[in-house]
Image (spheres, rainbow, N blue to C red):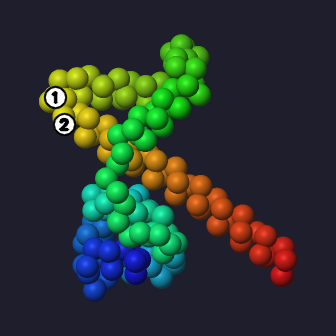
């Protein structure tokens, strides 16, 4: 939380709570329990081009470079390749996956109706957020593994 406050230039918890869109009491409780609202923090980080890796570890640059379209495109291609480039038939998909597919199709329809520059920006942002979320999950898993190993050694 301290790194986020520094990155966005706030000094008081109340300002950070407001930035994250939570009440000051909720913020205090979360801070006391060590329960960080990562979804909100990642949203702020994306809006402010703050490196999620830096927020988590303090290592590297505080600011992240603007999302590189080539990297985003390569990641999208890799995901499509992993899935064979095809969706499962709707009948073979679990219900949650069906709903996700419907929502994704609705989003694609909306993106087709707006200015291509805006739709590209939205797609780049979504890919960046997904990449950050995946990286966060990987880092959290690595931290848990580190804690288990440290406990085993102790």
Front residue of 74 and 143: 74
Rendered residue at 44%/46% (across/down): 130
Quarter of the image holding residue 51? bottom left
Circle 2 — which element?
Answer: helix
In the displayed orientation, state which residue is furthest to the right: 153
Residue tagged 2: 118
Note whether 150 is above or below 112 in the view shown: below
Circle 1 — which element?
Answer: loop
Disc marking residue 96:
none
Q: Is residue 3 visible?
A: yes
Rendered residue at 30%/25% (across/down): 108
* Horizontal relation, residue 36 to residue 153: left or right: left
Specify the quadrant that holds the N terminus. bottom left
Residue tagged 1: 114
- Marks 2 and 1 sit apart, C-alpha to C-alpha, by 7 Å
Front residue of 153 and 28: 153
Front residue of 10 and 90: 10
Label 2–label 1 contact, CB within 8 A: yes
Rendered residue at 37%/28% (across/down): 104
Quarter of the image holding residue 150? bottom right
* Horizontal relation, residue 103 to residue 110: left or right: right
Q: Position of residue 34 (x, y in %)?
A: 51, 76
Q: Badge 1, how many Cα within 10 Å: few under 14, some, many 20+?
A: few
In the displayed orientation, state which residue is furthest to the left: 115
Q: Is residue 126 visible?
A: no
Q: Position of residue 146 (x, y in %)?
A: 71, 69
How many marks do you count on the picture? 2
Rendered residue at 39%/49% (across/down): 129
Q: Badge 2, how many Cα within 10 Å: few under 14, some, many 20+?
A: few
Q: Position of residue 43 (x, y in %)?
A: 33, 57
């Amino acid at each position: 939380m301290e790194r986020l406050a520094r990155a966005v230039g706030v000094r008081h918890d109340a300002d950070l709570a407001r930035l994250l869109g939570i009440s000051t009491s909720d913020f205090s409780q979360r801070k006391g329990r060590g329960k960080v609202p990562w979804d909100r923090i990642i949203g702020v980080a994306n809006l402010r081009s703050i490196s999620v890796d830096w927020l988590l570890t303090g290592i590297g640059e505080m600011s992240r470079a603007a999302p590189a379209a080539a990297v985003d495109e390569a990641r999208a291609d890799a995901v499509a390749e992993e899935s064979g480039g095809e969706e499962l038939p709707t009948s073979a998909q679990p219900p949650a996956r069906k709903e996700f597919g419907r929502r994704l199709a609705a989003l694609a329809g909306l993106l087709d109706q707006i200015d291509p520059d805006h739709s590209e920006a939205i797609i780049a942002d979504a890919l960046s957020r997904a990449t950050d979320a995946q990286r966060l999950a990987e880092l959290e898993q690595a931290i848990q593994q580190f804690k288990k190993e440290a406990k085993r050694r102790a």
